[in-house]
Image: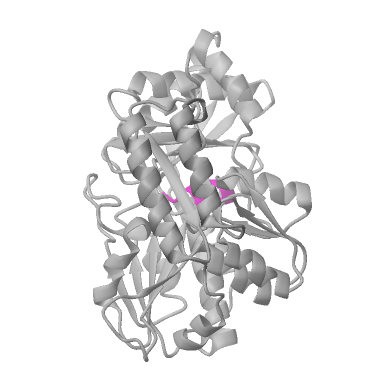
Amino acid sequence: MSRLFGTDGVRGRVGTELTADLAFKLGRAAAGYHLERGVRRALIARDTRLSGGMLTHAVTAGVTSVGAGVTDLGIAPTPAVSTLLAMVAGPSFGVVISASHNPYEDNGIKLFSPDGRKLSVAEEEAIERRFRVDADLDATDGTVGSCGPDGALVSKYLDAVAGRFRFTLSRTRLVIDAAHGAFAPHVRPLFSRYCNSVDWLNCDFDGADINRECGSTHVESLDPHLGPCAIGLAFDGDGDRMLIRIPPPLEKGGPGGVTVDGDAFLYLFAKHLVTAGPVIGTVMSNGALDAALETLGRPFWRAPVGDREVFEMMQKEGSSLGGEQSGHIILKDQRTGDGAVTALAFLQVFAERYAESAEAMAKDLPAPFPQKLVNVRVAEKRPWEDDPALSAAVAGAREKLGKHGRLVIRYSGTEPLLRIMAESPSAVAVEEQVSMLTARFRDRLA
Protein backbone atom coordinates (compact mmCIF):
# COMPACT_ATOMS: atom_id res chain seq x y z
CA MET A 1 0.00 0.00 0.00
CA SER A 2 1.47 3.32 -1.06
CA ARG A 3 1.88 6.08 1.51
CA LEU A 4 -0.90 8.69 1.57
CA PHE A 5 1.40 11.62 2.35
CA GLY A 6 4.19 12.71 0.03
CA THR A 7 6.97 15.22 0.63
CA ASP A 8 4.49 18.11 0.89
CA GLY A 9 1.19 16.75 2.17
CA VAL A 10 -1.29 14.83 0.06
CA ARG A 11 -1.25 15.73 -3.62
CA GLY A 12 -2.67 14.35 -6.86
CA ARG A 13 -4.91 14.74 -9.88
CA VAL A 14 -8.36 15.91 -8.79
CA GLY A 15 -11.16 13.40 -9.34
CA THR A 16 -8.89 10.38 -9.65
CA GLU A 17 -6.09 10.57 -7.09
CA LEU A 18 -7.55 13.33 -4.92
CA THR A 19 -11.31 13.12 -4.44
CA ALA A 20 -13.90 14.77 -2.21
CA ASP A 21 -14.31 11.47 -0.38
CA LEU A 22 -10.59 11.32 0.38
CA ALA A 23 -10.62 14.93 1.56
CA PHE A 24 -13.58 14.24 3.85
CA LYS A 25 -11.88 11.21 5.42
CA LEU A 26 -8.60 13.07 5.82
CA GLY A 27 -10.41 15.94 7.51
CA ARG A 28 -11.96 13.46 9.96
CA ALA A 29 -8.63 11.78 10.68
CA ALA A 30 -6.71 15.04 11.14
CA ALA A 31 -9.40 16.49 13.41
CA GLY A 32 -9.64 13.28 15.45
CA TYR A 33 -5.86 13.26 15.94
CA HIS A 34 -5.82 16.86 17.12
CA LEU A 35 -8.93 16.57 19.30
CA GLU A 36 -7.12 13.94 21.35
CA ARG A 37 -4.44 16.56 21.97
CA GLY A 38 -6.85 19.30 23.03
CA VAL A 39 -6.91 21.13 19.68
CA ARG A 40 -10.54 21.77 18.77
CA ARG A 41 -10.40 23.99 15.71
CA ALA A 42 -8.89 24.14 12.21
CA LEU A 43 -7.83 27.13 10.11
CA ILE A 44 -8.40 26.37 6.42
CA ALA A 45 -7.18 28.29 3.37
CA ARG A 46 -7.01 27.49 -0.32
CA ASP A 47 -5.48 28.76 -3.52
CA THR A 48 -7.45 29.72 -6.63
CA ARG A 49 -7.87 26.29 -8.29
CA LEU A 50 -11.32 25.39 -9.51
CA SER A 51 -11.34 22.34 -7.22
CA GLY A 52 -10.39 24.35 -4.13
CA GLY A 53 -13.96 25.09 -3.05
CA MET A 54 -15.04 21.47 -3.38
CA LEU A 55 -12.09 20.16 -1.39
CA THR A 56 -12.44 22.88 1.25
CA HIS A 57 -16.09 21.94 1.82
CA ALA A 58 -15.16 18.24 1.95
CA VAL A 59 -12.39 18.77 4.50
CA THR A 60 -14.67 21.07 6.51
CA ALA A 61 -17.39 18.41 6.55
CA GLY A 62 -14.88 15.85 7.78
CA VAL A 63 -13.48 18.09 10.51
CA THR A 64 -16.87 19.19 11.82
CA SER A 65 -18.32 15.66 11.63
CA VAL A 66 -16.11 14.57 14.53
CA GLY A 67 -16.77 17.69 16.63
CA ALA A 68 -13.99 20.12 15.73
CA GLY A 69 -14.66 23.63 14.42
CA VAL A 70 -13.44 25.30 11.24
CA THR A 71 -12.43 28.88 10.45
CA ASP A 72 -12.32 29.40 6.69
CA LEU A 73 -9.83 32.05 5.53
CA GLY A 74 -10.91 31.75 1.90
CA ILE A 75 -8.23 32.32 -0.73
CA ALA A 76 -4.99 32.93 1.13
CA PRO A 77 -1.32 31.95 0.79
CA THR A 78 0.07 28.96 2.64
CA PRO A 79 2.28 31.07 4.97
CA ALA A 80 -0.81 32.98 6.15
CA VAL A 81 -2.05 29.81 7.83
CA SER A 82 1.34 29.11 9.40
CA THR A 83 1.59 32.67 10.74
CA LEU A 84 -2.01 32.99 11.93
CA LEU A 85 -1.94 29.76 13.94
CA ALA A 86 0.19 31.60 16.47
CA MET A 87 -2.14 34.63 16.48
CA VAL A 88 -5.64 33.16 16.85
CA ALA A 89 -7.26 32.60 20.22
CA GLY A 90 -7.17 28.99 21.34
CA PRO A 91 -5.10 26.23 19.73
CA SER A 92 -5.92 25.34 16.11
CA PHE A 93 -4.32 23.16 13.49
CA GLY A 94 -3.91 24.29 9.90
CA VAL A 95 -5.13 22.97 6.55
CA VAL A 96 -4.12 24.38 3.17
CA ILE A 97 -5.81 23.23 -0.03
CA SER A 98 -3.16 23.77 -2.69
CA ALA A 99 -0.84 22.01 -5.10
CA SER A 100 1.70 24.85 -4.99
CA HIS A 101 3.44 25.23 -8.39
CA ASN A 102 1.62 22.28 -10.04
CA PRO A 103 -0.96 22.83 -12.82
CA TYR A 104 -4.59 23.52 -11.96
CA GLU A 105 -5.70 19.94 -12.65
CA ASP A 106 -3.80 18.90 -9.51
CA ASN A 107 -4.54 19.86 -5.95
CA GLY A 108 -3.28 18.98 -2.50
CA ILE A 109 -3.91 19.07 1.23
CA LYS A 110 -1.18 20.28 3.59
CA LEU A 111 -1.47 20.04 7.35
CA PHE A 112 0.12 22.33 9.95
CA SER A 113 0.62 21.88 13.67
CA PRO A 114 -0.77 24.42 16.18
CA ASP A 115 2.67 26.08 16.36
CA GLY A 116 2.67 26.74 12.61
CA ARG A 117 5.10 24.12 11.31
CA LYS A 118 4.36 21.44 8.77
CA LEU A 119 3.56 18.12 10.42
CA SER A 120 6.44 15.73 10.93
CA VAL A 121 6.53 12.38 9.14
CA ALA A 122 5.62 10.66 12.43
CA GLU A 123 2.56 12.90 12.87
CA GLU A 124 1.49 12.28 9.28
CA GLU A 125 1.83 8.53 9.78
CA ALA A 126 -0.35 8.69 12.90
CA ILE A 127 -3.03 10.57 10.97
CA GLU A 128 -2.76 8.15 8.05
CA ARG A 129 -3.40 5.22 10.36
CA ARG A 130 -6.62 6.88 11.51
CA PHE A 131 -7.49 7.60 7.89
CA ARG A 132 -7.13 3.93 6.95
CA VAL A 133 -9.44 2.60 9.68
CA ASP A 134 -11.80 5.63 10.00
CA ALA A 135 -12.32 4.90 13.70
CA ASP A 136 -13.36 8.42 14.69
CA LEU A 137 -16.91 8.66 16.00
CA ASP A 138 -19.47 10.99 14.46
CA ALA A 139 -20.46 13.98 16.55
CA THR A 140 -24.18 14.27 17.27
CA ASP A 141 -26.58 17.07 18.09
CA GLY A 142 -24.80 19.93 19.81
CA THR A 143 -21.35 18.36 19.55
CA VAL A 144 -21.05 18.87 15.77
CA GLY A 145 -18.30 21.38 15.03
CA SER A 146 -19.14 24.91 13.92
CA CYS A 147 -17.77 26.47 10.77
CA GLY A 148 -17.64 29.94 9.30
CA PRO A 149 -15.57 32.37 7.23
CA ASP A 150 -13.14 34.92 8.62
CA GLY A 151 -11.38 36.65 5.74
CA ALA A 152 -10.42 39.51 8.05
CA LEU A 153 -7.72 37.28 9.53
CA VAL A 154 -5.80 37.49 6.26
CA SER A 155 -5.48 41.25 6.79
CA LYS A 156 -3.91 40.53 10.18
CA TYR A 157 -1.39 38.28 8.45
CA LEU A 158 -0.56 41.01 5.91
CA ASP A 159 -0.13 43.54 8.73
CA ALA A 160 2.15 41.11 10.58
CA VAL A 161 4.33 40.71 7.50
CA ALA A 162 4.43 44.45 6.84
CA GLY A 163 5.29 45.14 10.46
CA ARG A 164 8.66 43.44 9.99
CA PHE A 165 9.97 45.91 7.39
CA ARG A 166 10.59 49.66 7.27
CA PHE A 167 11.82 50.93 3.90
CA THR A 168 10.58 52.78 0.82
CA LEU A 169 11.58 52.29 -2.81
CA SER A 170 11.94 55.69 -4.48
CA ARG A 171 13.77 54.88 -7.74
CA THR A 172 12.54 51.38 -8.53
CA ARG A 173 9.57 50.10 -10.52
CA LEU A 174 8.31 46.73 -9.33
CA VAL A 175 6.77 44.15 -11.63
CA ILE A 176 4.84 41.66 -9.50
CA ASP A 177 3.56 38.36 -10.92
CA ALA A 178 1.03 36.70 -8.60
CA ALA A 179 0.74 33.60 -10.84
CA HIS A 180 -3.09 33.76 -10.75
CA GLY A 181 -2.60 32.12 -7.35
CA ALA A 182 -3.21 32.49 -3.65
CA PHE A 183 -1.46 35.87 -3.39
CA ALA A 184 -3.42 37.33 -6.30
CA PRO A 185 -6.03 39.12 -4.12
CA HIS A 186 -3.44 40.27 -1.58
CA VAL A 187 -0.28 41.59 -3.27
CA ARG A 188 -1.67 45.08 -3.92
CA PRO A 189 -2.49 46.01 -0.31
CA LEU A 190 0.86 44.65 0.86
CA PHE A 191 3.42 45.89 -1.68
CA SER A 192 1.73 49.26 -2.28
CA ARG A 193 3.02 50.20 1.18
CA TYR A 194 6.62 50.14 -0.08
CA CYS A 195 6.55 51.28 -3.70
CA ASN A 196 4.37 53.71 -5.67
CA SER A 197 5.37 52.37 -9.08
CA VAL A 198 4.14 48.80 -9.53
CA ASP A 199 3.00 46.79 -12.54
CA TRP A 200 0.58 44.09 -11.39
CA LEU A 201 0.63 40.89 -13.45
CA ASN A 202 -1.62 37.83 -13.20
CA CYS A 203 -3.54 39.13 -10.19
CA ASP A 204 -6.84 37.88 -11.59
CA PHE A 205 -7.87 34.21 -11.69
CA ASP A 206 -10.48 31.96 -13.23
CA GLY A 207 -9.70 28.69 -11.45
CA ALA A 208 -7.83 27.17 -14.38
CA ASP A 209 -4.99 29.64 -15.02
CA ILE A 210 -2.91 29.24 -11.84
CA ASN A 211 0.80 28.86 -12.70
CA ARG A 212 0.02 28.75 -16.43
CA GLU A 213 3.14 30.10 -18.15
CA CYS A 214 3.64 32.56 -15.30
CA GLY A 215 4.90 32.79 -11.73
CA SER A 216 8.11 31.43 -10.26
CA THR A 217 8.22 28.40 -12.57
CA HIS A 218 8.17 30.72 -15.61
CA VAL A 219 10.13 33.66 -14.25
CA GLU A 220 11.44 34.49 -17.73
CA SER A 221 7.90 35.63 -18.62
CA LEU A 222 8.71 38.82 -16.69
CA ASP A 223 11.38 39.87 -19.20
CA PRO A 224 9.13 41.85 -21.59
CA HIS A 225 7.95 43.94 -18.63
CA LEU A 226 11.39 44.78 -17.28
CA GLY A 227 13.51 47.77 -18.14
CA PRO A 228 15.82 50.28 -16.49
CA CYS A 229 15.19 50.56 -12.74
CA ALA A 230 12.77 47.60 -12.74
CA ILE A 231 12.72 44.55 -10.51
CA GLY A 232 10.46 41.56 -11.17
CA LEU A 233 8.95 39.42 -8.41
CA ALA A 234 7.38 36.07 -9.30
CA PHE A 235 5.34 34.06 -6.77
CA ASP A 236 4.19 30.48 -7.06
CA GLY A 237 0.61 29.26 -6.78
CA ASP A 238 0.41 29.06 -2.99
CA GLY A 239 2.75 31.93 -2.14
CA ASP A 240 5.40 30.13 -0.13
CA ARG A 241 8.17 30.71 -2.65
CA MET A 242 9.31 33.65 -4.78
CA LEU A 243 12.02 34.43 -7.34
CA ILE A 244 13.44 37.75 -8.55
CA ARG A 245 14.16 38.75 -12.15
CA ILE A 246 16.39 41.73 -12.95
CA PRO A 247 17.48 43.29 -16.26
CA PRO A 248 20.78 42.04 -17.71
CA PRO A 249 23.94 44.05 -16.94
CA LEU A 250 24.27 47.12 -19.16
CA GLU A 251 27.48 45.90 -20.78
CA LYS A 252 25.77 42.67 -21.87
CA GLY A 253 22.40 44.05 -22.94
CA GLY A 254 20.11 41.66 -24.77
CA PRO A 255 16.50 40.71 -24.14
CA GLY A 256 17.00 38.13 -21.40
CA GLY A 257 16.84 38.98 -17.71
CA VAL A 258 18.83 37.48 -14.83
CA THR A 259 17.19 35.32 -12.16
CA VAL A 260 17.99 35.91 -8.50
CA ASP A 261 17.16 32.56 -6.88
CA GLY A 262 17.09 31.04 -3.43
CA ASP A 263 20.86 30.53 -3.34
CA ALA A 264 21.35 34.25 -3.98
CA PHE A 265 18.81 35.12 -1.28
CA LEU A 266 20.68 32.97 1.24
CA TYR A 267 23.95 34.72 0.42
CA LEU A 268 22.47 38.23 0.58
CA PHE A 269 20.59 37.55 3.79
CA ALA A 270 23.62 35.87 5.42
CA LYS A 271 25.71 38.91 4.56
CA HIS A 272 23.26 41.64 5.52
CA LEU A 273 20.31 40.38 7.63
CA VAL A 274 21.18 37.24 9.60
CA THR A 275 24.84 37.80 10.20
CA ALA A 276 25.63 34.94 12.60
CA GLY A 277 25.08 31.22 12.82
CA PRO A 278 24.96 28.40 10.27
CA VAL A 279 23.08 28.60 6.99
CA ILE A 280 20.97 25.67 5.82
CA GLY A 281 20.56 24.85 2.13
CA THR A 282 19.74 21.59 0.37
CA VAL A 283 21.45 19.00 -1.80
CA MET A 284 20.35 21.13 -4.78
CA SER A 285 22.14 24.30 -3.59
CA ASN A 286 24.86 25.43 -5.96
CA GLY A 287 28.45 24.81 -4.87
CA ALA A 288 29.24 28.49 -5.37
CA LEU A 289 26.97 29.30 -2.42
CA ASP A 290 29.00 26.99 -0.19
CA ALA A 291 32.23 28.71 -1.26
CA ALA A 292 30.80 32.22 -0.86
CA LEU A 293 29.48 31.54 2.63
CA GLU A 294 32.89 30.20 3.59
CA THR A 295 34.38 33.62 2.77
CA LEU A 296 31.85 35.09 5.23
CA GLY A 297 32.96 32.59 7.87
CA ARG A 298 29.53 30.95 7.91
CA PRO A 299 29.01 27.19 8.27
CA PHE A 300 26.81 25.71 5.54
CA TRP A 301 24.81 22.51 5.85
CA ARG A 302 22.77 20.67 3.22
CA ALA A 303 19.36 19.21 4.08
CA PRO A 304 17.29 16.92 1.86
CA VAL A 305 14.97 18.72 -0.57
CA GLY A 306 11.86 20.25 1.03
CA ASP A 307 11.20 23.27 3.25
CA ARG A 308 10.09 20.95 6.07
CA GLU A 309 13.49 19.24 5.95
CA VAL A 310 15.24 22.63 5.87
CA PHE A 311 13.27 23.83 8.90
CA GLU A 312 14.01 20.64 10.84
CA MET A 313 17.75 20.99 10.19
CA MET A 314 17.56 24.67 11.17
CA GLN A 315 16.08 23.61 14.49
CA LYS A 316 18.74 20.96 14.98
CA GLU A 317 21.67 23.26 14.12
CA GLY A 318 20.34 26.40 15.81
CA SER A 319 20.09 28.27 12.51
CA SER A 320 18.04 31.38 11.75
CA LEU A 321 18.42 31.20 7.97
CA GLY A 322 17.68 28.41 5.53
CA GLY A 323 16.11 27.75 2.19
CA GLU A 324 16.02 26.18 -1.21
CA GLN A 325 17.25 27.25 -4.63
CA SER A 326 13.61 27.25 -5.80
CA GLY A 327 12.87 30.30 -3.64
CA HIS A 328 11.62 28.75 -0.39
CA ILE A 329 13.35 30.81 2.31
CA ILE A 330 12.86 30.50 6.09
CA LEU A 331 13.98 33.50 8.12
CA LYS A 332 14.41 33.71 11.87
CA ASP A 333 11.05 33.10 13.58
CA GLN A 334 9.28 31.64 10.52
CA ARG A 335 8.31 27.98 10.43
CA THR A 336 7.77 27.63 6.70
CA GLY A 337 8.63 29.51 3.54
CA ASP A 338 6.86 32.83 2.93
CA GLY A 339 7.22 34.44 -0.49
CA ALA A 340 6.09 37.85 0.78
CA VAL A 341 8.61 37.91 3.63
CA THR A 342 11.36 36.78 1.26
CA ALA A 343 10.43 39.48 -1.25
CA LEU A 344 10.33 42.27 1.32
CA ALA A 345 13.56 41.13 2.96
CA PHE A 346 15.24 41.18 -0.44
CA LEU A 347 13.85 44.62 -1.28
CA GLN A 348 14.99 46.00 2.06
CA VAL A 349 18.53 44.76 1.44
CA PHE A 350 18.31 46.05 -2.14
CA ALA A 351 17.28 49.52 -0.94
CA GLU A 352 19.50 49.88 2.11
CA ARG A 353 22.68 48.10 1.02
CA TYR A 354 22.73 48.57 -2.75
CA ALA A 355 20.96 51.95 -3.11
CA GLU A 356 18.37 50.35 -5.39
CA SER A 357 21.02 49.42 -7.97
CA ALA A 358 20.40 46.01 -9.51
CA GLU A 359 23.77 46.17 -11.23
CA ALA A 360 25.64 46.81 -7.96
CA MET A 361 23.79 43.97 -6.27
CA ALA A 362 24.38 41.56 -9.17
CA LYS A 363 28.14 42.24 -9.05
CA ASP A 364 28.15 41.25 -5.37
CA LEU A 365 26.51 37.87 -5.96
CA PRO A 366 28.70 34.76 -6.29
CA ALA A 367 28.84 33.45 -9.84
CA PRO A 368 27.14 30.05 -9.76
CA PHE A 369 28.91 26.96 -11.03
CA PRO A 370 27.39 25.66 -14.27
CA GLN A 371 24.39 23.61 -13.23
CA LYS A 372 21.54 21.97 -15.10
CA LEU A 373 18.32 20.37 -13.87
CA VAL A 374 16.22 18.13 -16.13
CA ASN A 375 12.94 16.39 -15.33
CA VAL A 376 12.24 12.96 -16.83
CA ARG A 377 8.62 11.77 -16.73
CA VAL A 378 8.47 8.17 -15.46
CA ALA A 379 5.89 5.42 -15.55
CA GLU A 380 6.71 4.31 -12.00
CA LYS A 381 9.14 5.33 -9.27
CA ARG A 382 11.14 2.11 -9.02
CA PRO A 383 14.63 2.14 -7.43
CA TRP A 384 16.92 3.02 -10.32
CA GLU A 385 19.92 1.86 -8.28
CA ASP A 386 18.76 -1.73 -8.86
CA ASP A 387 19.29 -1.34 -12.61
CA PRO A 388 22.96 -2.18 -13.41
CA ALA A 389 22.92 -0.18 -16.65
CA LEU A 390 21.64 2.97 -14.91
CA SER A 391 24.02 2.56 -11.98
CA ALA A 392 26.96 2.26 -14.36
CA ALA A 393 25.84 5.36 -16.29
CA VAL A 394 25.55 7.39 -13.10
CA ALA A 395 28.96 6.26 -11.87
CA GLY A 396 30.52 7.24 -15.20
CA ALA A 397 28.83 10.64 -15.11
CA ARG A 398 30.10 11.37 -11.61
CA GLU A 399 33.65 10.62 -12.73
CA LYS A 400 33.43 12.87 -15.79
CA LEU A 401 31.96 15.77 -13.79
CA GLY A 402 35.23 15.84 -11.86
CA LYS A 403 36.16 16.07 -8.20
CA HIS A 404 34.44 19.44 -7.81
CA GLY A 405 31.31 18.27 -9.62
CA ARG A 406 28.05 17.08 -8.10
CA LEU A 407 25.26 14.86 -9.35
CA VAL A 408 21.87 14.55 -7.64
CA ILE A 409 19.26 12.11 -8.93
CA ARG A 410 15.95 11.90 -7.10
CA TYR A 411 12.27 11.36 -7.66
CA SER A 412 9.85 14.24 -7.23
CA GLY A 413 7.77 13.85 -4.11
CA THR A 414 4.68 15.35 -5.78
CA GLU A 415 4.81 14.42 -9.48
CA PRO A 416 5.74 11.35 -11.62
CA LEU A 417 9.14 12.83 -12.40
CA LEU A 418 12.78 11.89 -11.94
CA ARG A 419 14.98 14.93 -11.44
CA ILE A 420 18.58 14.91 -12.71
CA MET A 421 20.80 17.75 -11.47
CA ALA A 422 24.44 18.03 -12.53
CA GLU A 423 26.96 20.66 -11.50
CA SER A 424 30.61 21.18 -12.40
CA PRO A 425 33.12 23.95 -13.06
CA SER A 426 32.95 22.67 -16.65
CA ALA A 427 29.77 23.70 -18.48
CA VAL A 428 30.61 21.26 -21.29
CA ALA A 429 30.79 18.34 -18.86
CA VAL A 430 27.42 19.33 -17.34
CA GLU A 431 25.69 19.45 -20.74
CA GLU A 432 27.21 16.18 -21.94
CA GLN A 433 26.46 14.19 -18.82
CA VAL A 434 22.92 15.51 -18.34
CA SER A 435 22.12 14.71 -21.97
CA MET A 436 23.52 11.21 -21.61
CA LEU A 437 21.71 10.48 -18.35
CA THR A 438 18.42 11.94 -19.59
CA ALA A 439 18.48 9.59 -22.57
CA ARG A 440 19.40 6.57 -20.42
CA PHE A 441 16.76 7.18 -17.77
CA ARG A 442 14.07 8.01 -20.31
CA ASP A 443 14.82 4.76 -22.14
CA ARG A 444 14.66 2.65 -18.95
CA LEU A 445 11.94 4.35 -16.87
CA ALA A 446 9.61 6.31 -19.17
Instruction: Answer with left or right where residue 34 lies relative to residue 421.
Output: right
Is residue 182 positioned above or below 53 on the image?
Answer: below
What is the x, y in percent for residue 104?
28, 42
Corner quadrant of residue 56: top left
Whether residue 314 is in magenta: the answer is no
The answer to whether residue 237 of the structure is visible from this angle is no
The answer to whether residue 384 of the structure is visible from this angle is yes
What is the x, y in percent for residue 224?
24, 75
Residue sitting at x 41%, y 74%: 192
* Quadrant the C terminus occupies: top left
Instruction: Answer with left or right where residue 202 lies relative to residue 176.
Output: left
Whether residue 77 is in magenta: the answer is yes
Residue sitting at x 54%, y 9%: 137
For the magenta stretch, what is the residue range? Answer: 76-83
Q: How is the image coloured?
A: one colour
Residue sitting at x 53%, y 42%: 395
Magenta region, main secondary structure: helix
What is the x, y in percent for residue 351?
53, 84
Is residue 359 positioned above or below 174 on the image?
Answer: below
- Number of labelled discs? 0
What is the x, y in percent for residue 214?
28, 59
Residue sitting at x 44%, y 54%: 239
Corner quadrant of residue 285: bottom right
Is residue 38 positioned above or below 98 on the image?
Answer: above
Instruction: Answer with left or right where residue 87 lies relative to residue 238.
Output: right
Is residue 85 positioned above or below 196 on the image?
Answer: above
